[in-house]
Image (cartoon, rainbow, N blue to C red):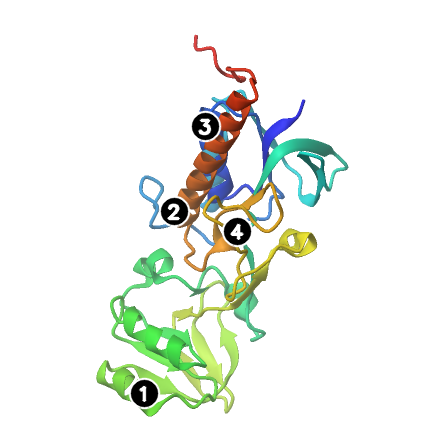
Amino acid sequence: MNQDVVIVGGGPAGLSAALTLGRGRKKVLLCDSGAPRNAAADEVHNFVTRDGTPPREFRRIAREQLGAYPSVSLRDAAVVDVVREGELLRVRTDDGAEHLTRRVLLTVGVVDEVPDIPGARGLWGHSIAQCPYCHGWEVRGLPWGVLAPSAKLAEWALLLTGWTDDVIVFSEGADLPPDVVARLSQARVRVEPRRIRRLLGETHLEAVELEDGARLARRMLFMHPRQRPAPLVERLGLALDEQGFVRVDEQKQSSMPGVHVAGDAATPLQAAIVASSAGMMAAALLNHALTVEAALQGGPSTRPGAARP
């Protein structure tokens, strides 16, 4: 049987979309590769009712709740291709299965390109992060650093003084504008021009070692790493905006007809609760379009799960 929507990605955006479409009595298949972007994080934060929940537990609870909707099914597989066949889309997964669907909703996030600094990869998601609202409270008042080789990122350090009064901007040799340096100095934020050689610490950051061997004790390092589209987005050749995110219209449809996108893949405003909201909104738009389409075509008035005991 054809699906109404195949959702690609089982993070907050995809799970929220599946819930919304399930409650709209749409036949939904959610495909999850099992490699969430926040896998390295200890906990999800700034998400009301789920603050402090480990990412794995967050997904378990969501999947359990989706079980109440018989029109929603889950498949632990990665989608490797989407091709159009007439008015439908054929979705192929890495386990060899194929599914026909009326629409596809991509909630695949982005790929973070963590800087090639020794020690950074192992600390990513623990002592290295990009969102103080998600990771700041637990290390409040401790020594922080900001990797900021540009004026815009250096100015961002001013925000971080809301969590700690000990902030160092690591400019990686970049010449920051004098007015930016003056503003940072006024806020008692130090600028360190020497390049970082490596980051020290096993499970949590302990110090930043500079190019001359000097070590500065730091417990948290914030940065905005480069991000690139997920492999499936690149494979499908979806149009990107000037910031490198998938370009979508007001219906969240991408440049490929029938393929919609929600969550981190389509916006620089990234947090679990923001992605969840984006997934719900995209699903509501899809549900409206599919319902009206079926009604005007004289389709069935009920869907799986219509009966209530």
Q: Nearer the viewer, residue 37 or 250?
A: 250
The relative height of residue 135 versus residue 254 in the rendered view (above or below) is below
Query: Residue at image x 55%, y 72%?
Result: 115
Of the image marks 2 and 4, the number of the one nearer the N terminus: 4
The alpha-carbon separation of the residues under discs 3 and 2 comes to 17 Å
Contact, mark 1 vs mark 3 (Cβ under 8 Å): no
Q: Which residue is mark 3?
A: 65
The alpha-carbon separation of the residues under discs 4 and 1 comes to 36 Å
Please indicate whether residue 104 sits to the left or right of residue 195 in the image: right
Please indicate whether residue 51 sits to the left or right of residue 5 in the image: left
Measured as percent of width and height from the top left, residue 150 is found at 43, 81
The alpha-carbon separation of the residues under discs 2 and 1 comes to 34 Å
Of the image marks 2 and 1, the number of the one nearer the N terminus: 1
Q: Which residue is mark 4?
A: 39
Numbered disc in front, either 4 or 3: 3
Numbered disc in front, either 4 or 1: 1
Which residue extends farthest left? Answer: 186
Q: Which residue is mark 1?
A: 181
- Please tell me how many numbered marks the rendered image carries: 4
Q: Secondary structure at mark 1?
A: helix
Measured as percent of width and height from the top left, residue 221 is found at 42, 70
Which residue extends farthest top? Answer: 309
What is the quadrant of residue 175 in the picture?
A: bottom left
Q: Which residue is mark 2?
A: 273
